Amino acid sequence: MGYKNPLKLTRQSGAMFALLTTALAMIGTVAAETSLLREDDTVGASFWIATAMMFAATAFFIMERGSVAPKWRTSMTVAALVTGVAWYHYTYMREAWAQTYALGAGQSPLVLRYVDWLITVPLQVAEFYLILAAVGAATAMLFWRLFGASLIMLISGYLGEAGHAPEMPMLVIGCIAWFYIMYEVWAGDAKKGADTASEGTQFAFRAMAIILTVGWAIYPIGYFMGTGDNPNVDFLNILYNLADSVNKVAFGLMVWYAATMDTKASASAEE
C-alpha cells in the first residue's frame, strides 16, 4: 500500500504545476513565433516538429513526476529539464532559420544549437549518475568524468564547426570523448554499478546506453556533412533536428518507463 495515497496528492500537485508551466510555455511560444513557415521550407518544418515534440515531452514528464517513487523524481526532473531547455532554444532556432530562409538562404543557427547542447548534453550524461546514485551504486568521480568528457566533446565540436579550429582534428577529439563515455556506460564503473541495481534501473541504464551509442552517432555524421568547402546546411539541420527530437524525448521516456516499472514493483512487494 506504500505509494497509493501519496501518489494521489503528488499527482494532483504535479498536474497543477504542469498546467502552469504549459500556460507560460504557450505564451513564450506565441511571442517567439513571428515568421510564417513557407510551404517549400522542409528544414523549417523539421524545426517546428522538434519544437512541438520537446514542448509536449516537457509537459508530460512534469505531470508524471508525481506518479513515481521519490528516488526517481530527480531523474524525472532532469528529463523534463532536458526537453524544456531544448524547447526554449528551438523556439529561437526555428525563428532564426525562418527569417534567413525568407531572405533567400536559410542559415544554420550554430551558436544557439551549441548553447542548447552545452546545457542538455551534460544533463543527459548526468542522468546515468543520478539513476545509479538512487540505488547507491555511483561515485562523485564517475559524475565528474562523464561531465568532463561531455564538455570536451561539445567544445571541440563547436570550435570545429564554427571554424575556430581545424575541422577534422576537432571531430577526432570530440569522438574520442564520446568513445570514452560509451566505454564508461558499457564496460566501466557505470556499467558495474548498473549490474547490481534493480530491474527498472538496469532497464533505464541499458536503454539510455543504446540511445547514447546509436542515437548520438547521428551527430558526427551531421558534423561531417556540415564541414568542408560545400557544406550541406539543409541536410545538417534536418539531421540535427531529427536526432535531438528522438534522442532527448526517447531518453526521457526510457527514464519514465523504468521509473514507472520500478515503482509498481515496489508497491506490489509492499502489498
Image (cartoon, grey):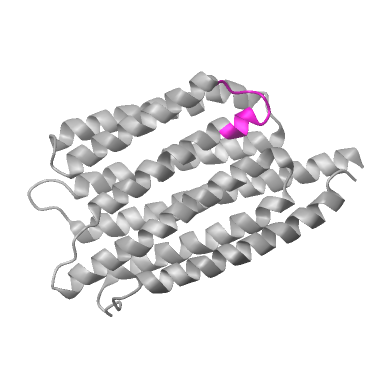
Question: Relative to residue 78, is residue 107 depicted above or below?
Answer: below
Residue 25 lies left or right of residue 89; in this view the side is right
Q: Residue at x 70, y 35 (%)?
A: 199
Please state which of residues 24 and 88 is positioned toward the viewer in this rendering. 24
Magenta span includes 134: yes
Q: Which residues are magenta?
A: 130-139
Q: Residue at x 67, y 55 (%)?
A: 64
Q: Residue at x 24, y 41 (%)?
A: 158
Magenta span includes 136: yes
Please state which of residues 57 and 220 is positioned toward the viewer in this rendering. 57
Please state which of residues 240 and 141 is positioned toward the viewer in this rendering. 141
Which quadrant does the C terminus fall into?
top right
Residue 9 placement (x, y as % from top left):
79, 56
Q: Quadrant of residue 12?
A: bottom right
Question: Relative to residue 215, is residue 40 depicted above or below?
Answer: below
Task: Mark yes or no: residue 216 visible.
Answer: no
Please state which of residues 212 and 135 is positioned toward the viewer in this rendering. 135
Residue 7 placement (x, y as % from top left):
79, 52
Q: Residue at x 24, y 34 (%)?
A: 156
Residue 75 placement (x, y as % from top left):
60, 41
